[in-house]
Image (tube, grey):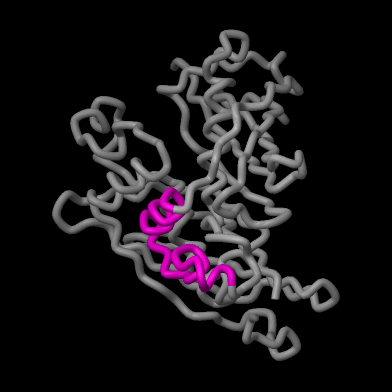
């Protein structure tokens, strides 16, 4: 079971992640995007962006870096082999673009027990190099009990 | 840059549909792109050892492809400002046939004042809804 005392716990900022143009293209192909702003720099610039725009769900890559710090935290006691993704949401203040240098901080928003399982909701805030909020990623993991 | 006039939209209006064929290749590609190398997404023996019927797609892959319908409707993927889903059912990916995911969308809510429209997505595999409450807000 997940330690309920980690509710409200905050995890420190991850090392900066530099968003690369080819990484955006690689991710865009993986999610079957044909959207020009994800793939074509000229299209992105014509639409008013400085560079390629990351697909809507790309922020998961940054979220995972924060999540890794929680999963490695013995106090949280999360058994990753028992984890199922329950829900996921991204709220973007602005799209992530190539050239962004992103850090993220994570807060354990809630820990709930439900019939022997734990449901843990994480809120990951993603910041750019100017420390401006770019996106918030909210993720609920279901950790199956021992049974 | 959008071609859509918000005043011409109605709640319930359909925005179209798109089909995505997820194959084992798609899963390997997504694993590499996302960094999620959980073997349940590429090894049948491992998936079965943890009680699954077989290899399943990353929920985040299904989520990532489903929103393409909304992004293509608005034309500019950067205008999708809020997107959430619940992972309700697994998408098992057959080794030879793959898994066909069918996405349809309709207008769920119109906020004329702020120029924001909510698209409600229906995401179906094998006649079963696999993402619940899949909603994307786009800024027009």
Side of B79 relative to A24 (left or right): right
> Can residue B130 be seen by looking at this rendering?
no
Instruction: Report the magenta residues as a range.
Output: A22-45
Side of B8 relative to A16 (left or right): right
Q: Residue at x 77, y 44 (%)?
A: A132
Side of A78 relative to B4 (left or right): left
Most common SS among magenta residues? helix
- Residue nearer the viewer, B100 or A71: A71
**Vertical side of A47 occupied by A28: above or below:** above
Q: What percent of the width, then of the height, locates residue A38? A: 49, 63
Is A52 in the magenta?
no
Q: Residue furthest right?
A: B113
**Vertical side of A81 occupied by A96: above or below:** below
- Residue nearer the viewer, A23 or B137: A23
Q: Residue furthest top?
A: A74
**Vertical side of A4 occupied by A52: above or below:** below
């Amino acid at each position: 079971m997940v330690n309920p005392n980690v509710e409200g716990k905050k995890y420190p900022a991850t090392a900066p992640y530099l968003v690369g143009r080819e990484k955006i293209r690689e991710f865009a192909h993986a999610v079957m995007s044909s959207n020009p702003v994800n793939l074509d720099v000229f299209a992105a610039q014509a639409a008013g962006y400085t560079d390629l725009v990351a697909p809507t769900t790309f922020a998961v890559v940054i979220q995972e870096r924060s999540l890794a710090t929680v999963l490695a935290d013995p106090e949280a006691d999360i058994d990753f082999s028992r984890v199922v993704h329950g829900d996921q949401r991204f709220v973007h203040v602005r799209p992530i673009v190539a050239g962004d240098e992103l850090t993220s901080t994570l807060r354990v928003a809630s820990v709930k027990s439900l019939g022997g399982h734990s449901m843990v909701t994480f809120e990951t805030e993603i910041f750019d190099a100017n420390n401006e909020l770019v996106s918030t990623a909210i993720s609920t993991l279901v950790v199956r009990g021992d049974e | 840059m959008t071609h859509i006039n918000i005043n011409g939209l109605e709640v319930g209006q359909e925005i179209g549909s798109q089909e995505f064929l997820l194959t084992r290749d798609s899963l390997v590609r997504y694993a590499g792109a996302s960094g999620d190398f959980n073997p349940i997404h590429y090894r049948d023996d491992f998936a079965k050892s943890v009680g699954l019927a077989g290899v399943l797609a990353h929920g985040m892959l299904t989520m990532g492809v489903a929103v393409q319908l909304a992004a293509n409707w608005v034309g500019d993927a950067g205008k999708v400002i809020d997107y959430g889903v619940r992972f309700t059912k697994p998408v098992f990916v057959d080794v030879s046939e793959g898994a066909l995911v069918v996405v349809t969308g309709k207008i769920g809510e119109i906020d004329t004042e702020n120029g924001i429209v909510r698209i409600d997505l229906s995401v179906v595999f094998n006649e079963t809804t696999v993402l619940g409450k899949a909603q994307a807000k786009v800024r027009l």
